[in-house]
Amino acid sequence: MNKSSAIVGIVGILIGLLVGSFVFPGKSGIDDQASSGVESGGDVASVQKVRWKMASSFSAQLVLGGTMGKTLEEQIYKLSGGEIELKFFDPGSLVPALEIFDAVSAGAVNAGWTNPGFWAGKVPALQFFAAVPFGPSAGETVAWMYHGGGLELMQEIYARHNIYSQPCMLIPPEGAGWFRKEITSVDELKGLKMRFFGLGAKVMEKIGVSTQLIAAGDIFPALELGTIDATEFSLPAIDLDLGFHEVAKHYYFPGWHQPTTMGELMINLADWNTLSEQQQTIINEACRSNMLKSLAEGEAIQFPALQTLQSKGVTLHRWPDETIEVFRKAWEEVVVEEAANDPDFATVLASLTEFRTNYKVWGDLGYLD
């Protein structure tokens, strides 16, 4: 048993116990209509019905990224016995994929299905709650979030922007990038235009790559048209779904920049505060259930995806150790610079570093690897 499976197993047991107590009989589906507010029940004893809109950064059809958002929509509806409808909307239907933060903060939409790393330009510290280069595994991540102070820090930062956020998806390591030709040295990366996410983008810039953040649905056209030379996005199964292999045939691993990645459900804080304690608990526990489901599915579907990619002419590569060390040294420079420039970044970094230092004592003793 590895570190991830041990902790995720415990989380799964707790989810089963907690979520089971909130299951109510109700409709089997979700109505097509979703308003932006709360409806009062017909009698004094009835609770308010919630009819909210949730803007997504990912298409509903996208493996994990979108499908887990739809799963959350259904799960919350069922667990609440139809009291809560959190209606999923594809990118652009309500707001563009990378403008959800502002829309939720302002109350233009009730909720967002997205990723904290997209808000690096607004709040750099939030990137820690998405993915950390050379960072913790999935198991260690949830340990820090739920038992090491990570969740409290995340919610404290978001609250300043009138947002409530809950981790709501967790996936395994990603691929490190798609390239049109084989990369034989770090020098060949210099000057490339590459779509890159989060803190890893700062690392790539250190070694001479020109990076930009592009929403999922816009990456393939940018790659096909030559607007970018290379890209990274997610897991093999998700990257396969987005079709990168049709343009780039060299796929690199490991995903040093995202050893695990968390997604989030964000809700306008004023709207969140209108919910009853029970309704809030239903949403939170549905998200914890989603964390387990997404991690399990993410681990299960990568090998078939890799086989399919190889059958389509993709060559799989593993970065040499010396290249990984170049990335690592660049990351060590980035993290010092970012912490010096942003107090919240420094605070979250200190929390995660302390937790990882303590966790390592247990990890080195308790696990084989």
Image (cartoon, grey):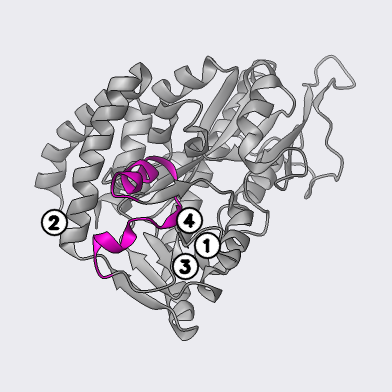
Amino acid at the residue labelled 4: Phe
Residue positioned 73% across, 29% down in the render: 109
In space, the residues marked 3 and 2 are separated at their CA atoms by: 25 Å
Pick the residue in front: 189 or 328: 189
Residue 238's disc is: 1
Q: Nearer the N terminus, badge 4 or badge 2?
A: 4
With 2 as the anchor, is 210 left or right in this view? right
Residue positioned 24% across, 55% down in the render: 2
The reply to whether discs 1 and 4 touch (Cβ–Cβ < 8 Å) is: yes
- Mark 3, residue position: 301
Q: SS class of the residue under badge 3?
A: loop
- Mark 2, residue position: 368
Q: SS class of the residue under badge 2?
A: loop
> Residue 146: image x %, image y %?
38, 31
In space, the residues marked 4 and 3 are separated at their CA atoms by: 16 Å
Residue positioned 37% across, 32% down in the render: 145
Amino acid at the residue labelled 1: Ile
Q: Quadrant of the C terminus?
A: bottom left
Say above or below: 300 vs 195. Answer: below
Q: Quadrant of residue 317?
A: bottom left
Q: Nearer the N terminus, badge 1 or badge 2?
A: 1
- Mark 4, residue position: 233
Q: SS class of the residue under badge 1?
A: helix
- Magenta-highlighted residues: 184-208
Q: Quadrant of the N terminus?
A: bottom left
Q: SS class of the residue under badge 4?
A: loop
Pointer 2 local density, CA inside 10 Å: few below 14, some 14–19, many at least 20: few
Pointer 1 local density, CA inside 10 Å: few below 14, some 14–19, many at least 20: many
Q: Nearer the N terminus, badge 1 or badge 3?
A: 1
Say above or below: 349 vs 196. Answer: above
Amino acid at the residue labelled 3: Ile
Q: From this viewpoint, is residue 279 visible?
A: no
